[in-house]
Structure formats: C-alpha cells, structure tokens
C-alpha cells in the first residue's frame, strides 16, 4: 500500500529538509561530495555566484544563439513558459548577438581575463561550426529548445532540459573551446585547438544524452563544435549511443541516484550528518574550481561537519 506522500509523489521529509526535490544529469555526473555542498548547503541564489568562466560563457551563449536560429519554441526561466520564437534569428543577426555578448562579458579574475583576451577571436568560427551542425540535422518544425524532460528514479525525479528536439530527434550541443599554451618568455600565450572526440563522445555527455533519450523516446545526437569543425555522434558511429550503451548509462545514473538517496535518508535531513561521511577530493583537476571564496567556505563547512 502506498502512503499519501507516495501517491502525491512527494519525496521523504529528509529530502524536503535539505531542499532537494530532484536530481539532474549534471548533478549525477559530479562527485557526491561536490553535489552535497552545492545542492544541500548552498541555495540556488548562492550557486549562481560560483565561479564562472569565459569558456563556460561561450558554450552557453553559442548554444542559446543556435536555439534562436533553429527553434520554434523555447522555454524561458523568467516566465516558466514555452515562448514561440516567432521570428527566428538569422545567421547574420546571430553574429551580431554573439559579438555584443562577448564585448559585454566581464572576466571573473586575472586568469579568466587572459583566457578571454586570447580566445574571444575564435568565438565567431565556433559559432559558425555549431550553426552548420544544427543546420545539417534538418530538424522538422516544431523544434523545441530547453524542453523539460524527467524520469522518476526512486524518491525523486531526475530532470533535465534538451538543447533542441523535434518529433523524432533530439540534439545535445557541446562546445570544445580553445586552450592556452604555456606562457612564453615574452609573457604572451598562444592558443591551441582542443580537438573534437574521435571515436566516442565524452562519457558524461553520452550519459546525459542517453537520459534524454529515455525521457523522450527520441533518437539522440550529440553535436560537438570547435573553431575548426563540427562532428555529430549518434548510434550509427559510436557504441555509447546504441541501445545497449544507453541502457548502461541509465543504470549508471540510477546507481548514482541511489547512492545519494541512501546518504540523504541516513542524514535524516541534517546537513552536517549528510556531509560527515563524505570525502571531498580538494586536489581534483577541476571539480572544486568554484572560486577561492567558495572553496574556502566548502572546506570550512566540511571541517565543521566532520569534527
């Protein structure tokens, strides 16, 4: 017999006490320690203040412009509704929007400023290739951007938003931004192209896209683009997007959700009890690059919980 909370699909009280009402592919791709800090300790407003970089900005901005180019409807966070894109943005207008956005960008810190100064000139070609990748998909109207899709795992739903989808296909866009070489003796830095995946998409990208497939029933495609080219993966050219490969990804997400479920239920909704048995890898290559102030806060928060 289901209780009232289960009938109403309400999560257990421990979830509510921690402010956790869903998971997402991005959450499940991160370590449990980072996830617990970001989603149980911080509020959504605080998460928006975590370190952001020009590399992240480029990926988001080019994705947004491509949606304006090709989507008939786009979900907007401001209104919480799907707004008709009555006059699709032309490629020329998209060029202008990208240029203005880059000019207005304010670097996070000195390192981000160096990256911005060296890489911003590559943004136009990155957008060109992303645009051509979308165009090659020949998606049929109505094409929807940022569609909310979800699946119930155990206690809560796993939710995400697709970059673009029509009646039969869904597209996930990923940008490979340039990198910077080591500083030369004269103080300058040269830019290097980060190559697109050769045989298989990044495992986390494949898992995310597989989730979208199971949530929508549509054939998935992953579009990669850098400043030199674009490449599209689907079930025809990579194992991770085949039926078996995607089923493996779905099972992985269910395991990751179950690990978080158990930690939440053991904590009884108490933040310190959730954190006390976790082991953050502070030396991870990128995971804790959330800004010096927030890193210090995370370390102090874990130290206090694990006394």
Image (cartoon, rainbow, N blue to C red):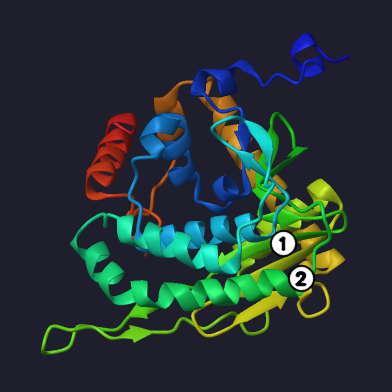
Q: Position of residue 266 (x, y in %)?
A: 56, 26
Q: Is residue 250 visible?
A: no
Q: Quadrant of the N terminus?
A: top right
Residue drawn 19% across and 83% down? 183
Q: Is residue 109 visible?
A: yes
Q: Quadrant of residue 119?
A: bottom left
Q: Quadrant of the C terminus?
A: top left
Residue drawn 41% across and 77% down? 122
Q: Which mark is residue 18?
A: none
Q: Position of residue 125 (x, y in %)?
A: 49, 78
From the viewer's side, name the closer residue of 51 and 130.
Answer: 130
Inter-mark Cα distance, 2 to 1: 8 Å
Q: Which mark is residue 137?
A: 2
Is 136 rendered above or below residue 229? Answer: above
Give the secondary structure at mark 1.
Answer: strand
**Which residue is disc 1 drawn over?**
171
Residue drawn 50% across and 75% down? 126
């Amino acid at each position: 017999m289901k209780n009232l909370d289960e009938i109403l699909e309400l999560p257990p009280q421990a979830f509510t006490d921690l402010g956790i009402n869903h998971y997402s592919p991005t959450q499940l791709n991160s370590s449990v320690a980072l996830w617990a800090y970001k989603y149980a300790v911080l509020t959504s407003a605080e998460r928006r203040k975590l370190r952001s970089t020009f590399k992240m900005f480029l990926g988001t901005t080019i994705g947004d412009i491509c949606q304006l180019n090709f989507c008939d409807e786009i979900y907007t966070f401001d209104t919480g509704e799907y707004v008709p894109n009555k006059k699709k943005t032309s490629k020329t207008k998209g060029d202008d929007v990208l240029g203005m956005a880059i000019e207005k960008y304010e670097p996070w810190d000195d390192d981000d400023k160096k990256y911005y100064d060296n890489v911003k000139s590559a943004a136009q070609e990155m957008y060109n290739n992303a645009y051509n990748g979308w165009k090659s998909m020949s998606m049929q109207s109505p094409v929807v951007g940022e569609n909310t899709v979800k699946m119930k795992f155990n206690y809560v739903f796993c939710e995400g938003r697709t970059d673009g989808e029509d009646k039969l296909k869904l597209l996930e866009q990923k940008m490979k931004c340039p990198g910077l070489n080591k500083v030369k003796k004269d103080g300058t830095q040269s830019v290097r192209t980060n190559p697109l995946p050769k045989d298989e998409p990044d495992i986390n990208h494949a898992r995310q896209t597989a989730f979208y497939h199971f949530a929508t029933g549509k054939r998935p495609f992953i579009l990669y683009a850098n400043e030199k080219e674009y490449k599209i993966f689907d079930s025809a050219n990579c194992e991770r997007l085949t039926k078996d490969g995607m089923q493996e990804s779905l099972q992985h997400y269910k395991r990751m959700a179950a690990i978080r479920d158990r930690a939440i239920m053991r904590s009884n909704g108490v933040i310190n009890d959730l954190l006390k048995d976790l082991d953050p890898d502070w030396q991870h290559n990128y995971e804790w690059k959330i800004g010096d102030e927030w890193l210090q806060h995370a370390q102090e928060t874990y130290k206090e919980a694990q006394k």
